[in-house]
Image (spheres, helix red, strand yellow):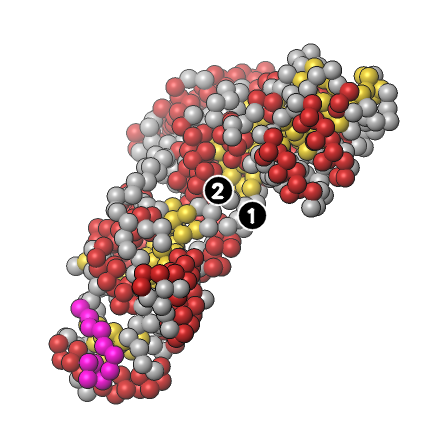
Amino acid sequence: MSFPQAFVDPSSVAVVGASEDRAKWGYWLAAGALAGAGRRQVWLVNRRAAQVLGQSCRATVDDLPQAPDLVALCVPPRHVLPVVREALAKGCRAFLSITAGLGADEAELAALLRESGARLIGPNSLGLFNAAADLRLAWGNFTPGRLAIVSQSGQLGSEIAGLGARAGLGVSRFYSVGNQLDVTAVDVLESLVSDEHTGTVALYLESFADGARIVSALEALRRAGKHALVLTTGASEGSRLLARSHTGSMTSALDVVDAACRAAGALRVATPRELVDAARVLDATTPPGGRRVAIISDSGGQGGIAADLAADRGLRAPVFTERLQARLRDLLPAAATVSNPVDLAGAGEADLQVYARVTELVAASGEVDSIVLSGYLGCYGEDSPSLVDAESAVIDRLGRRRRTDAARVPLIVHSMSAASPAVARLREHRVPVFDTIDAALGALGHLTRLGGRPRPAPMTVRTEAAVPAPGYWAARTFLTALGIAMPEARRVTDAAGFAAACASLRPPLVLKAGWIEHKSEHRAVRTGLGPHTAAAVFREMYERLGPGEYVVEEQDIRPGVVELLIGARRDRDFGPTVTVGHGGVLAELWHDVSVELAPVDRRTAAGMLDRLRSRRLLDGWRGQPAVDLDALIDAVVTVSEAIAATPGLADIEVNPIRVGPEGALAVDALVVPRAEDVVAKAACEATGVNGHRETTEEQEASREHVH
């Protein structure tokens, strides 16, 4: 169902529960609605008052001369359903419900909306705002601008708007979606794609139901030239807790949200302040094309701190070439430092225009992707009135630069003054200015993640595979059919079969109890078996664990091997995901993983490896040879395609996959069907479908596998 124009620019609005009391919602909605009375018809409804804010009131919606395009509800919970019924009968099909605490009435309200084809924002909404349409149905006041706010928490959305206003950043639209009984955050996101007044979208969500559609909406915003900043808490945690693999326990909810943001070209931030800081820079400039930053300061101490903070935020302050350093020396005193950071060494006091000259020279060099100007600029006129005009002139020059081709290298200013006339002038020129260096570099560090090439659209290239039966042997069969290399192995069930297998395989050997998922934890795997030890080990394991499907494998003893894991699982909200990380029995201790939505292409898989703390092990460490990265990347892509192409799978885990100079070899694996598919199959077979009725023991085995 499309997003109604009534939530964007209604032709008429009725406020039910209008009030003269500034402490009540009815006042703010009535005052806000009346502020747009020059654009639309506004009616106020109050059973007890003949007039509110100088406007005549009707007692009921039914008393209105015609059906309002939008009805705003701020009445006690018990009155919401009767008012909605009355408005529907009148012909209204769009509602904004501020009222919370509907309890059991929510279900009845949802059914009523569905039956009538009506739409509702809320309940428990803090309202909506559209600057371009003079539509204000919310508590408080909004400064018009280009930031759209879509928030599940109305108060947090209001905080973002307030922080933005104090920083000179205005709002284009504001939607508090509340309980999302009908209209959801993704409905609003989709409506913003074509909004010419919005440049950046701030999204706060506590849950990501319909995650694939959210990703699609964020992608659409990116294609439309709008940036999305996402703020959330521990969303999607339930799917992590339900996962049975090591991968599931090692990846957090926020890992998956970050993966979704990367896939969509959006950016997750941690706090409202971080969001507003990033939005301020996006409002003024484009994200930098890389992580190379020039730091220009009039204090060696401030420049050094800035360089340290830049490195901490993933930025690089590269040493300038000799050519650029020589040109800087021509502009600056002999005591100046010109390698990066640049210390002006008092040159600004002699001639304020040096701030602009150095900035322009560095920007034109091609050696950096962004510039941070840090220190006293912004304070000169405030402390010495005789310097007001000179400081204004250099700020105007920096402002003009922002509107030229040179702006492809964004400039961010850190000023020691928070609110001087010079700082205000920088903001008038839309030059991002911060009063702390950590805020300036924090915003820049975030934005570099938006400046690179967007992740290619995922394409599933494999056809759906048959979901394997439980157990390690079936997992081996499934993975080798996909092209994942595994050691030579035999399946055995008794001592005689084990002896025959040992005779046909090259020692040393590995023995595994194939039906046990986490083998190390249950002493269900033994390595290093030779001709003199194998039989005794099998006998001990068999006596301890009982009959079942055992697997004997040739042990991988190649030198120069690094153990990693590749996992894939189906997230409850976002669907298929793939993980790569430091593997083996200590995987959860090191907790070094990288996650993406699946499937991934080779470029994305390589980027996943680059984000690992253990990445340097793959290039050779302390004299070890570099491993076969192509084989590892192939395996990541293959597993990602398998989970995406096979809806019946819940988890795939290859742990460890041993990668050496001569290729990658998976030496243990787990493949888990989706629980509902296992239950359905068990129920189907137990009732005789497909000509088979399970025994009691088989039914118990199926249930045990599910749990």
Residue type at numbered disc 2 = Asp
Q: Which mark is residue 224?
A: none
Give how far across and how far down residue 666 sits, in percent.
25, 62
Q: Which residue is mark 1?
A: 233
Q: Secondary structure at mark 2?
A: loop
Q: Earlier in the sequence, mark 2 or mark 1?
A: 2
**Of residues 47 and 311, which is closer to you in this image?**
47
Count neighbours of disc 2 (C-alpha within 10 A) and say few if under 14, some if 14 to 19, many if 20 or more. some
Decide whether residue 137 is among the magenta residues: no
Q: In this rendering, would 461 be left or right of 183?
A: left
Give how far across and how far down residue 176 sits, in percent.
62, 34
Count neighbours of disc 1 (C-alpha within 10 A) and say few if under 14, some if 14 to 19, many if 20 or more. some
Is the Cβ of the residue at disc 2 closer than 8 Å to that at disc 1? Answer: no
Asked if one can make out residue 268 in the rendered structure from this viewpoint, the answer is yes
Would you identify the image quadrant in which residue 505 lies? Answer: bottom left
Q: Which residue is mark 2?
A: 210
Q: Secondary structure at mark 1?
A: loop
Foreground mark, 2 or 1, reads 2
Would you identify the image quadrant in which residue 205 lies? Answer: top right
**Of residues 596 and 422, which is closer to you in this image?**
596
Q: In this rendering, would 98 be left or right of 182?
A: right
- The image shows residue 465, relative to residue 327, as above or below, that is below
Q: Which residues are magenta?
A: 488-498
Asked if one can make out residue 310 in the rendered structure from this viewpoint, the answer is no
Q: Whole-Å distance between the Cαs marked 2 and 1?
A: 17 Å
Q: In this rendering, would 335 be left or right of 181?
A: left
The image quadrant where one finds the C terminus is: bottom left
Give how far across and how far down residue 260 sits, in percent.
43, 43
Q: Residue furthest left?
A: 504
